[in-house]
Amino acid sequence: MSRTSILIGCTSHQPQFADECAVGEVFYRAPVYDVIFSCISPRDLVRLGYTCHAAYAASKDYSRRAFLINRHISRFLEKPLDFRSLQACTGTLIAGSNALQFLDRTFYVDADMDLYVHPGHAREVLDYVVEREGYTFKPHSRQPQDYRTIVSDTWDNTQTGRCYSIKGVKSVFSLEKHGSNGFLKIQVIECATSPFDTIINFHSTCVMNFIAFDAAYSLYPIATFEDRSTLQVWRERPLHDLTVPIKYGQRGFQWFSTLPGNMTSQSFYPHRIRTVGDQYTWRLALDMQGVELRPQMSLSSTPFQFDPVTCNGWSLLERDEEMATVYEPIQSSIFRYNYTTANAILHLDLYRFMLEQCFLRRTSLQLEGTDLLEQAKQTWYVITTTSLLCG
């Protein structure tokens, strides 16, 4: 119903039109519908927007203001557009409780910002946070005072390293500063293989959310934002350590150590082959105005202007009477980044493809006397095609 018809209804003496007028006017007053929308879940926000034209326009207006990514990032980083441009060039993801707060439209006191970085990009991201944003590196007892002595711009995609207690994490760098928003802390997590491989091994499903340069993703949106529940998928902490379940219980989430035996279990989509951005994922597109995309590697390379996280897959399956995220790695010197998949056919096809390409390239480069890794850097983006990795 249009606003004109509502107002006409208000001038009539029919009670039903007066009721329609009162309801319709709610969706023309931002201070009123902001209060209503802030109390409902993301799915209910979308559903309410389908009820009439006024509600749709109001929900769009509210969402545009509630999910302001530049405002969200600016709490920790004064130049959010510059940082998002860095994300576009490096595939860096914001994850953990920070991404959860953004999608849940909430705020956790004393929570920090976690940045998950691909191998080979850690120094670039650390330099940005220190030199451009004014943070100071705070090493732990086993780290040197200068992070540059233990991170570099070089990498070899045929090898992985792990020297941290959490699966998928190579190193953690803490950076701090006292700014206009008080004490701030950023952690740069250098991943052993990829940010997604680390995120999918988080302690439970409610924190399997992340923010790329162009979109924010929740892998388990119904369980997280509708059921307010989270399923444990990580057992590297001692069983008696209840700090994480207690913390997220205080934040309003019901903790499940095993798959629940009711309808809630379907919110975790068990036994399905999942991919980032599939029908079960909540993908929230972000405002891209002012964000600089990744430059073309060379004149012969194809543009790589999407985030590589979209080319990952996994499944949630039982392992030893518990649930675990299960996948196969996709790792080769012909790919700049590493990926995962739960699709056995795709994994087999990619394995054959990688063997063939590696053999042909090594043969060609040995004949030419060219260094394999250096030459690979010029052709990664030709071989890393969306059609291959996304299946």
Image (spheres, helix red, strand yellow):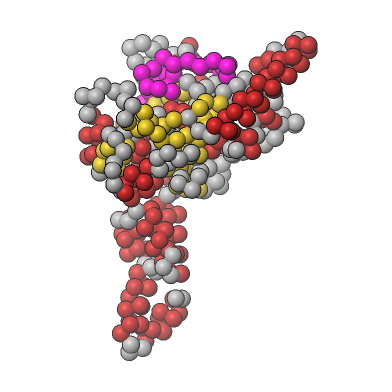
Q: Which quarter of the picture shows residue 318?
A: top left
The quadrant of the picture occupied by the C terminus is: top right
Front residue of 218/340: it is 340
Q: What secondary structure is the magenta-colored segment mainly? A: loop
Number of marks in the image?
0
Residue 156 coordinates in the image, percent (x, y): 58, 16
Residue 148 % position (x, y): 48, 15
> Considering only vertical position in the picture, is 10 above or below 215?
below
Compared across the picture, whether 69 is left or right of 335 comes to: left
Q: Residue furthest bottom?
A: 13
The residue lying at 32 percent from left, 78 percent from top is 19
Left or right, 49 with respect to 377, comes to: left
User: Which residue is at a point 51% across and 43% down the rendered structure image?
Assistant: 277
Q: Which residues lie in the magenta part?
A: 151-177
**To which quarter of the image does residue 363 belong?**
top right
- The N terminus sits in image quarter: bottom left
Query: Residue at horizontal 78%, vertical 11%?
Result: 367
Along the viewing direction, whichever of 340 and 64 lies nearer the viewer? 340
Q: Is residue 329 left or right of residue 38?
A: right
Q: Tell me if I can see residue 116 in this picture.
A: no
Q: Nearer the viewer, residue 22 or 71?
A: 22
As for residue 211 lying within the magenta part, the answer is no
Is 380 drawn above or below residue 285 in the view shown? Answer: above
Residue at 27% x, 34% y is: 257
Q: Is residue 348 above or below residue 98?
A: above
Q: Give x and y (percent) for residue 130.
A: 45, 25
